[in-house]
Amino acid sequence: MSRWLALGIWLFPASAMAAPKTLEIGQGTFEIGGHATANVYFVDIGDGFRFDIAPQAGIFVSDQVELVGTLDLVWVNGNVGMRVDLGGDYFFDAAYVRPYAGASLGFGSYPYVDVIAEQVASATARGGVLLPLNRNVAVDLGLRLAFLLDDAELQLHIPLGFIGVRAFFP
């Protein structure tokens, strides 16, 4: 298993280096993509494992600004939660990789160690870099910081690893 993981980690950057130098993105471009994260956590009320899978869609309203919607499905120790996020990403000019930064606001349920909290509001800051596989598909390597507000209690979630795939349709 670890050999396949090492091979995958090596192939993503290697395939991106062989790809064309630019993604075809700009005003009017649609995007469909998603990401997955996995985490192990250690807290006072118990330890556990968390897995997220989040499909997303977006549209570029200018050459560098995209409006994005995400459906975040979260699994924690057998409990499932769902959150909807709406936000935007700003793509910086670059010759090869496409760095970006963005933010979103969300609302939904969120599983904790042994319970599912209802009516959780969230604010997420994000950034990363797109490594093009071809002119329309890129691997998304990034960082997410999610601030969660539940019953006036603020929590911070930082995924340990983030990887996604994004496809763009001009």
Image: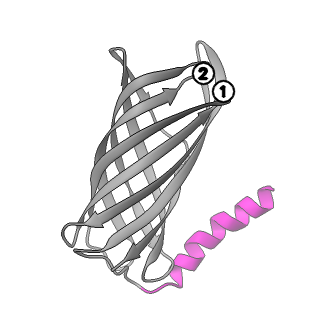
Task: Answer with left or right where residue 167 lies relative to residue 75.
Answer: left
Q: Main secondary structure of the magenta part?
A: helix
Q: Nearer the viewer, residue 144 or 53?
A: 53
Disc 2 vs disc 1: which is toward the camera?
A: 2
Give the quadrant of residue 118: top left
- Asked if disc 2 and disc 1 are in contact, CB closer than 8 Å, the reply is yes
Q: Please determine whether, in this image, residue 64 is positioned above or below residue 68.
A: below
Give the quadrant of residue 65: bottom left
Q: Is residue 76 magenta?
A: no
Instruction: Please identify the residue farthest to the left as the structure is shown.
Output: 62
Give the quadrant of residue 130: bottom left
Mark 2 or mark 1, earlier in chain: 1
- In the image, the segment drawn in magenta is 1-20
Q: Where does residue 42 sit, x and y in percent of width and height?
A: 61, 23
Task: Answer with left or right where residue 72 lies relative to residue 127.
Answer: right
Q: Is residue 13 magenta?
A: yes
What's the residue at 41%, 32% (across, down)? 108
What's the residue at 55%, 23% (across, down)? 112
- Dot label at residue 117: none
Q: Please determine whether, in this image, residue 162 is positioned above or below residue 133.
A: above
Q: Nearer the viewer, residue 43 or 6?
A: 43
What's the residue at 46%, 63% (across, down)? 33
Q: Where does residue 119 sit, x and y in percent of width and height?
A: 38, 24
- Dot label at residue 48: 1
What's the residue at 58%, 78% (across, down)? 15
Please name the residue that numbered disc 2 is placed on: 113
Number of marks in the rendered image: 2
Quadrant holding the N terminus? bottom right
Q: How is the image coloured?
A: one colour
Q: CA distance from mark 2 to mark 1?
A: 7 Å
Q: Secondary structure at mark 1?
A: strand
Task: Answer with left or right where residue 166 lies relative to residue 59.
Answer: right
